[in-house]
C-alpha cells in the first residue's frame, strides 16, 4: 500500500476508527453525549478529508477500490446525509429506553459500508460494502426492541435482504464464470458492443439487477418498503431512504456504465419498464396513504425511479444531473423525516396525517421546515427540488427519451397531490384536543435550519453546484 | 436595477409582513400597501423613460444565473408589460384594501402569500428568459394554493386540487416544449440558451414547431382558460377569498394572454399562422359558451366567473387576428377586463357578506335599500357588456375591427357575443337590484372604504373609455415591434398556406401606417 493509497482512503478512515473508539469507550463507561460527540466528529472529519483528497484523484487502490471525483461526490453526499441524520437522531434516541450508544456505532459502520460501495470497483468490494451496510441496517431497523413493529420490520428486512443478496451473489458468480474476472473495468474491456449476450450472461446480469433492485426498492422489488419504513425508528427510516440508497445507487451507476448497459437493447427495455413502473406505482400507492412514514417510503420509491432514468440517458451529463437530484432528494427527505423524529418520542410516535394536523399553528418553524421539504420533493420553484427536477428532465429531453419524460411529468403531477396533502394537513385547523410535542433539541434545530436554508439557497442560486458537477464529475 | 427591484421589493415586503403580522395585523397590511405603492410609483416613472429607437424595450437588463445551462436573468419591459405591471400593482393595492376586514386570521401569512403571488405575476410579465418565465409561472401557484386552501370557503380543498393539477399539467407540457426548443436551437447554432431574443427565429420542420407551440398553448389555454379546459375555473373562483379571486381573475388570466402575445408569435410565426383559424374558433366558442353558462347561474360569483370566460374569448380572438388594431384591442381588453372583473367580484363579496348568501334567487329589490351600491353595480355591468364610453367598449370594438380585417366571418359571428353578454349582465342586474325586495336583513349601503375602492376603479374604466389614447400610445411601439419581428420572419420562411390572405392584409396595413 502506497502513501497515496492511504491518502485517498483518509475520508473513510474516521468512519472505521470511530466505531472502534466508541466501542472501547462504552466498555469502560457509557456516556450518551460523548458518544454522540465522537460520532459527529468522525463524520465531520470524514467530510473535511474529502476536500483534502481531491488533488490525489483519480486513483485506484489495488483492484478493489477506485477513488475518483464520482466516488468523492457520492462520499460527500453520503457522509453529509449521515451527519444530518445523526443530528436529528439526538433527541429521539436519547429518550429511548435501554442502551442507546450502540445506535451510533452501528450507524457509523453502516455509513462505512455505503462509503465503500461508492468506491467499489470489483465484485468483492461491492459485496463487502453491501453486506457491511445491510447487516448494520438489520440492527438499526429493529433498534426499538420493545416495539413489535420495529422488530417485525427488522426481521422482514433481514429475510428479504438476505435473499436478495443471494440473488446478487449468484448473478455475480454467473458473470464471473463467463469472463473470469470480477473487476468492473476488465469486464468492460471484454464486453465490446454490439455484443450478443449469451443466456448465461443475461441471467447473471438479470440476477444482479434483482439484487440491486431490491436494495433500491425498484418496482417490482419494492414491497418491503412501507412496512420497514413504518416499523423502523424514524431517523433510521431517513437513513434507509437516503444513505443506504446513495451507496447502492453509486455502485449501480458505476457498474452499469462500466458494462455500457444502456447500449444493450434488452437492458434498455427492462430498465425502461422498471423505471416507468417505479415512477408510477410508487405514486399510486402513496395517494391514499395516511401514514407519513409509509408515504415517504413510497415517495422514495418514486424518486429512485426518477434517478434510474439516467441509466438510460447513458452519458456523463446525465450522471451529473442525477447526482444533483440525489443530493436534493436526500436533503429534502431527511428534512421531512427529521421533523417527524424531533416531534416523536418512543411512546408517542408522530407519523400519521392526524398527528401533524394543524402543526403550523403550534410549531410554526417545524411546519415551515416540513413545508420546504415537501415543496422541494414536489419540485416547486424557489426550492432546490424545482431545479433538480428541471435538471433531470432537461437531460432526459436532451437524450431524446421523450416517452420517459412524459412518464416523469405525469408522475410529478400525481406526486403533487400527496405532498400537498401533507402541507394542507399542517395548515388546516385543529380540533380542541391538546397535542404535546417534546422540546426541540439544539442539534435537531440546527439540522433542520441547515436543511431549510440549503433547500431555499439552492433553489435560487444553484449555478455554482451545477458548474462544479460539470467540471469534476465524469465516469 | 429597477426591474429586479420591483420583484425584490414584493418578496421583501412579503417576508416582512409575515414576520410583523405575528404582532400586528395592521402592520402587515400597511407593509403590503407600502411595498405595492412603491412598486406602482417605480413603474410609473418607467413611463417617462424614452424608448430607445429600433427596439421596443423601455428597460432591458440581463445577468447570468446558471450559465452552465444557458440560463440568465433576462428581464425587460415594453409598453405592453408596463401597462400590465401597473394593473398588477393597482389590483394588488385593491386586494389589500378589501381584505382589511375580510381576512382576520393569520393576517401576516395571508399577506405573505398575496405578495409572493404578485411577485410571481410581476416576474412573468418581465421575463425574457424561458427558464425564468417558467420559474415565475410556477411560483404564482403555491401562494394561490395557500390563499385558497386556508382562507377560502365552501369546497375549497377540492377546488384547490383541481386548480393545481389542471394548471400543472399545462405547465409541464410547456416545460417539455421549452426544453425541446432549447435543444433544437442549440444543435443548430451551437448556442445553448433560454434567452427569448436569441431563440426567436429558430427554425425546424413545420410539424415539430407546431408540436412545440402546442406545449406553450396548453399552459396558456389552461390559465386563460379556453372552453374545454375551463373546468377548474368556476370552482376555484368561487372558493377563493375575495382577494384571491381578484388575483386569479384580474391578473393570472392576463399572464396567459400576455404569454400568447409575447412568446407564441415571435417564436412560432408560421405555426401560429397555421393555428390562427382554430384559435379564433376557440375564442368564439369561449365567448358564447361562457355567456350561456353565465346566463344559467344562480350563484352570483359563479355567474361572474363564467362571464370572465366569455370576455377572455375576445382576447383569444384578437390575439389570433395578427394585426395592430386587434392587438391594441387585446391590450386594452386585458386592462379593462382586469378592472371590471375586479369591481364585479368585489361587489359580489360586499353583497354576499351583507346577505349571507350568493344566491341570486334570494336577492332582488336592493336598489331602494342601497342606491349607491346599485349605481356602482349598474356602472360596472354596463362596462362589462361594452357600453360606449367605458374601457371595455374600446377594447372589444378594436378587437372586432382587427378581426374583421383578418377574418370577416369570425368577426361577424363574434359581434353577437356582445349581445349575449348584454343579456346575462342585464339579467344579473335585474335579479339583484330590481324586482321585489326579498331580504329582511338590515342592509347597509357601501362603506367609505368600499366607496373609495369602487371610485378608483370607476375613474380608470371611464378614463380608458373616454381617452384611450393615453393607454394606446404606451403600448403602440411594443405592439408594432412585436408584429413586425414576426412579419420579418414570416417573409423569411417563405411560408405559403391558407392564411396568405390575412397575412397580405396585414402587410398592407402596416405599410399604410408607415
Image (cartoon, coloured by chain):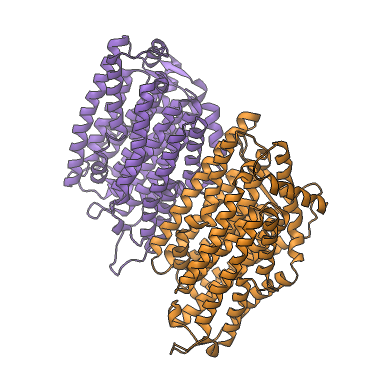
Chain colours: A purple, B orange
Pick the residue in front: B152 or A237: B152
For the question of whether residue B100 can be seen, the reply is yes
Residue drawn at 66 percent across, 64 percent down: B396
How many marks can you see? Answer: 0
Determine whether, in the image, residue B320 is placed left or right of residue A46.
Answer: right
Pick the residue in front: A433 or B211: B211
Determine whether, in the image, residue B406 is placed left or right of residue B255.
Answer: right
Where is residue B40 drawn, in percent x and y? 67, 64
Q: Quadrant of residue A354?
A: bottom left
Where is residue B159 drawn, in percent x and y? 42, 61
Residue drawn at 76 percent across, 54 percent down: B477
Where is residue A79 drawn, in percent x and y? 40, 34
Compared with B193, B28 (above or below) is: below
For the question of whether residue B18 can be seen, the reply is no
Compared with A372, B471 (above or below) is: below
Compared with A99, B433 (above or below) is: below
Quadrant containing the N terminus of chain A is top left
Amino acid at each position: 500500500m502506497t502513501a497515496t493509497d492511504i491518502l485517498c482512503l483518509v475520508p473513510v478512515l474516521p468512519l472505521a476508527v470511530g466505531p472502534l473508539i466508541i466501542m472501547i469507550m462504552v466498555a469502560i463507561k457509557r456516556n450518551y453525549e460523548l458518544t454522540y460527540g465522537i460520532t459527529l466528529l468522525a463524520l465531520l472529519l470524514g467530510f473535511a478529508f474529502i476536500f483534502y483528497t481531491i488533488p490525489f484523484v483519480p486513483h485506484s487502490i489495488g483492484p478493489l477500490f477506485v477513488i475518483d471525483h464520482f466516488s468523492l461526490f457520492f462520499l460527500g453526499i453520503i457522509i453529509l446525509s449521515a451527519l444530518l441524520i445523526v443530528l436529528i437522531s439526538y433527541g429521539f434516541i436519547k429518550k429511548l429506553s435501554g442502551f442507546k450508544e450502540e445506535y451510533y456505532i452501528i450507524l457509523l459502520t453502516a455509513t462505512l459500508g455505503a462509503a465503500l460501495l461508492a468506491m467499489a470497483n470489483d465484485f468483492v468490494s461491492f459485496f463487502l460494502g453491501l453486506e457491511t451496510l445491510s447487516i448494520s441496517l438489520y440492527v438499526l431497523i429493529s433498534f426499538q426492541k420493545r416495539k413489535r413493529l420495529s422488530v417485525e420490520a427488522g426481521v422482514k428486512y433481514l429475510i428479504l435482504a438476505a435473499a436478495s443478496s443471494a440473488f446478487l451473489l449468484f448473478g455475480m458468480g454467473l458473470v464471473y464464470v463467463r469472463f473470469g474476472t470480477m473487476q468492473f473495468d476488465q469486464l468492460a474491456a471484454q464486453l465490446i458492443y454490439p455484443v450478443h449476450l449469451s443466456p448465461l450472461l443475461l441471467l447473471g446480469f438479470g440476477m444482479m439487477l434483482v439484487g440491486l433492485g431490491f436494495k433500491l426498492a425498484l418496482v417490482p422489488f419494492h414491497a418491503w418498503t412501507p412496512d420497514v419504513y413504518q416499523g423502523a425508528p424514524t431517523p433510521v427510516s431517513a437513513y434507509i431512504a437516503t444513505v443506504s440508497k446513495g451507496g447502492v445507487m453509486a455502485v449501480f451507476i458505476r457498474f452499469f456504465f462500466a458494462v455500457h448497459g444502456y447500449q444493450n437493447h434488452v437492458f434498455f427495455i427492462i430498465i425502461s419498464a422498471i423505471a416507468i413502473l417505479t415512477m408510477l406505482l410508487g405514486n399510486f400507492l402513496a395517494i391514499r396513504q395516511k401514514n407519513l412514514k409509509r408515504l415517504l417510503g413510497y415517495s422514495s420509491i418514486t424518486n429512485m425511479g426518477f434517478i434510474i432514468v439516467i441509466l438510460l440517458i447513458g452519458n456523463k451529463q446525465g450522471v451529473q444531473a442525477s447526482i444533483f437530484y440525489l443530493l436534493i432528494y436526500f436533503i429534502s427527505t431527511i428534512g421531512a423525516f427529521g421533523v417527524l423524529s424531533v416531534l416523536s418520542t418512543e411512546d408517542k410516535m408522530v407519523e400519521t396525517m392526524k398527528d401533524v394536523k394543524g402543526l403550523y399553528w403550534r410549531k410554526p418553524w417545524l411546519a415551515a421546515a416540513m413545508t420546504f421539504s415537501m415543496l422541494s420533493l414536489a419540485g416547486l420553484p424557489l426550492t432546490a427540488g424545482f431545479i433538480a427536477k428541471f435538471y433531470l428532465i432537461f437531460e432526459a429531453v436532451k437524450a431524446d427519451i421523450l416517452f420517459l419524460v412524459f412518464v416523469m411529468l405525469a408522475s410529478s403531477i400525481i406526486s403533487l397531490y400527496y405532498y400537498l396533502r401533507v402541507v394542507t394537513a399542517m395548515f388546516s385547523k385543529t380540533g380542541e384536543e391538546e397535542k404535546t410535542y417534546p422540546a426541540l433539541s439544539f442539534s435537531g434545530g440546527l439540522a433542520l435550519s441547515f436543511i431549510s436554508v440549503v433547500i431555499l439557497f439552492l433553489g435560487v442560486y444553484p449555478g455554482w453546484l451545477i458548474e462544479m458537477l460539470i467540471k469534476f464529475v465524469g465516469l | 436595477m429597477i426591474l429586479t427591484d420591483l420583484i425584490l421589493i414584493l418578496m421583501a415586503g412579503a417576508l416582512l409582513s409575515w414576520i410583523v403580522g405575528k404582532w400586528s395585523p395592521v402592520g402587515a397590511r400597511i407593509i403590503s400597501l407600502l411595498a405595492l405603492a412603491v412598486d406602482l410609483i417605480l413603474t410609473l416613472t418607467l413611463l417617462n423613460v424614452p424608448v430607445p429607437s429600433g427596439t421596443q424595450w423601455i428597460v432591458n437588463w440581463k445577468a447570468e444565473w446558471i450559465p452552465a445551462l444557458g440560463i440568465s436573468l433576462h428581464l425587460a419591459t415594453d409598453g405592453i408589460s408596463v401597462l400590465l405591471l401597473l394593473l398588477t400593482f393597482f389590483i394588488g393595492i385593491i386586494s389589500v384594501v378589501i381584505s382589511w376586514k375580510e381576512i382576520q386570521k393569520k393576517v401576516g401569512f395571508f399577506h405573505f402569500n398575496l405578495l409572493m403571488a404578485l411577485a410571481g405575476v410581476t416576474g412573468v410579465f418581465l421575463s425574457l428568459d424561458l427558464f425564468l418565465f417558467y420559474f415565475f409561472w410556477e411560483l404564482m401557484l403555491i401562494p394561490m394554493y395557500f390563499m385558497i386552501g386556508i382562507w377560502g370557503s365552501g369546497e375549497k380543498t377540492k377546488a384547490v386540487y383541481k386548480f393545481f393539477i389542471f394548471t400543472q399539467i399545462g405547465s409541464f407540457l410547456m416545460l417539455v416544449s421549452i426544453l425541446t426548443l432549447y435543444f433544437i436551437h442549440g444543435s443548430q447554432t451551437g448556442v445553448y440558451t433560454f434567452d427569448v431574443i436569441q431563440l426567436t427565429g429558430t427554425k425546424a420542420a413545420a410539424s415539430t414547431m407546431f408540436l412545440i407551440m402546442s406545449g406553450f398553448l396548453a399552459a396558456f389555454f389552461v390559465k386563460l382558460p379556453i372552453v374545454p379546459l375551463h373546468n377548474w375555473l368556476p370552482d376555484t373562483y368561487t372558493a377563493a377569498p375575495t382577494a384571491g379571486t381578484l388575483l386569479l381573475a384580474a391578473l393570472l388570466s392576463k399572464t396567459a394572454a400576455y404569454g400568447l402575445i409575447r412568446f407564441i408569435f415571435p417564436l412560432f410565426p408560421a405555426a401560429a399562422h397555421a393555428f390562427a383559424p382554430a384559435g379564433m374558433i376557440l375564442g368564439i366558442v369561449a365567448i358564447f359558451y361562457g355567456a350561456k353558462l353565465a346566463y344559467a347561474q344562480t350563484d352570483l360569483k359563479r355567474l361572474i366567473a363564467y362571464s370572465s370566460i366569455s370576455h377572455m374569448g375576445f382576447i383569444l380572438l384578437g390575439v389570433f387576428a395578427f394585426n395592430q388594431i386587434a392587438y391594441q384591442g387585446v391590450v386594452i381588453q386585458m386592462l379593462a377586463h382586469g378592472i371590471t372583473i375586479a369591481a364585479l367580484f368585489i361587489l359580489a363579496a360586499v353583497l354576499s357578506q351583507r346577505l349571507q348568501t350568493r344566491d341570486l334567487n334570494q336577492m332582488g329589490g336592493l336598489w331602494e335599500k342601497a342606491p349607491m351600491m346599485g349605481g356602482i353595480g349598474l356602472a360596472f355591468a354596463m362596462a362589462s357588456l361594452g357600453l360606449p364610453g367605458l374601457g371595455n367598449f374600446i377594447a372589444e370594438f378594436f378587437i372586432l375591427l382587427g378581426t374583421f380585417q383578418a377574418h370577416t366571418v369570425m368577426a361577424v359571428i363574434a359581434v353577437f357575443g356582445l349581445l349575449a353578454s348584454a343579456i346575462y349582465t342585464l339579467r344579473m342586474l335585474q335579479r339583484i337590484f330590481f324586482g321585489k325586495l326579498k331580504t329582511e336583513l338590515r342592509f347597509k349601503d357601501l362603506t367609505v372604504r368600499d366607496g373609495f375602492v369602487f371610485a378608483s376603479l370607476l375613474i380608470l374604466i371611464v378614463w380608458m373609455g373616454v381617452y384611450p389614447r393615453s393607454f394606446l400610445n404606451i403600448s403602440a411601439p411594443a405592439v408594432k415591434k412585436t408584429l413586425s419581428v414576426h412579419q420579418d420572419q414570416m417573409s423569411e420562411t417563405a411560408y405559403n398556406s391558407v392564411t396568405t390572405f390575412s397575412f397580405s392584409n396585414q402587410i398592407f396595413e402596416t405599410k399604410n401606417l408607415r
